[in-house]
Amino acid sequence: MPTPRMIRRFVLQGAVALLLLLACPLLRGSAEAAITCTLTGPTLTFGTINIFASSTTSGNATLTCTTTGQAQTFYACLSIGTGTGGTTASNRTLAFGANTIPIQITGGASWPSQIGNGTSYPMEGVVSFSVPRQSSGSYTFPIVVTIPAPSPLPTPGTYASTFTGTDFQAYWDTTSHATCAALVSAGTTTIATGTFSASAIVVNQCGVSATNMNFGSASLLTAALSATAQVSVSCNATLPVTIALDNGATGTGPTNRLMKAGGNSIQYGIYKDSAHSQPWGSTLGTNTATSTGPSATLTAYGQVPIQAAPTPGSYADVVGVTVTY
């Protein structure tokens, strides 16, 4: 039978072993706690754009953070750089070979200024969001890409730019910072990188504009009145174009258009020549005008013929111009 002293020794050894077993799970759980963040970006496609107007498309970039330990509040800034189509972060473009289309990148209503990398335009932020214990959470950055009406007109092709690596990244920390500059320079900051892209298709297009034709003032129409207007066509390629003028609001033909003032009217015509011998109308191959792009300006010659004196008033008409290419 063991002596009392030996029994006490066995009890003490058992107590030490029990304490070690209880401590090991606590140490192991602390070592495995981790915080990670990932950044994903949108693939934005404009499709075929109207090169005579601005175009906009939008999507979302998402910063997702996961903690396997305690609940965390994350602070982040989104940085967007030059992209593969641009030359600098302040000159971002979509590119098709050597041809480019300028773009603007903003955060929509929540961040109407352009988003940059802190040197050209400011980063977006600081934003914050909370993630529960042992869970994931995210923050969504709206991305709005705008193509202003291009000038000069872009060549037909597919234009694109990709933002990845240092051109598309989020700086994040679990410590609060007042500015993105402070967050970026903090020693505890981590960077998550991702990719987003934008593309647009440009096809052959032509646009048309015209100045007003003003016959001035007259008391009696005992002599013909003449006036001119300029019709300008702009294309993004060398294209044959046909320009048609309709008969106006109530006219019945190229030489029988009507300017109206209430129920009263004045007859007039529009011609392709100063001698007023070639009516300009809308019948293809008969009385339309032709030219070749990429740009052309044609003169429209208007004439009010001698006719009965109209009732005094301000007479007007609207003539539609159509370009076929």
Image (cartoon, rainbow, N blue to C red):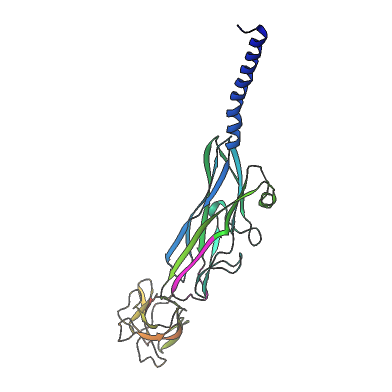
User: Of residues 318 and 183, which is closer to you in this image?
Assistant: 183
Looking at the image, is 35 positioned above or below residue 165?
above
User: Of residues 132 and 283, which is closer to you in this image?
Assistant: 132
Please indicate whether residue 119 sits to the left or right of residue 224 in the image. Answer: right
Please indicate whether residue 289 sits to the left or right of residue 139 in the image. Answer: left
As for residue 157 lying within the magenta part, the answer is: yes
Residue 203: image location, x then y, percent: 41, 73
User: The magenta stretch spans which residues?
Assistant: 148-163
Q: In which quarter of the image is residue 14?
A: top right
Please indicate whether residue 325 sits to the left or right of residue 99 in the image. Answer: left
Residue 272: image location, x then y, percent: 39, 88
As for residue 112 lying within the magenta part, the answer is: no
Residue occupying image coordinates x 59% and y 24%: 21
Residue 170: image location, x then y, percent: 59, 52
Q: Is residue 302 in view? A: no
Residue 63: image location, x then y, percent: 54, 48
Q: Is residue 144 in view? A: yes
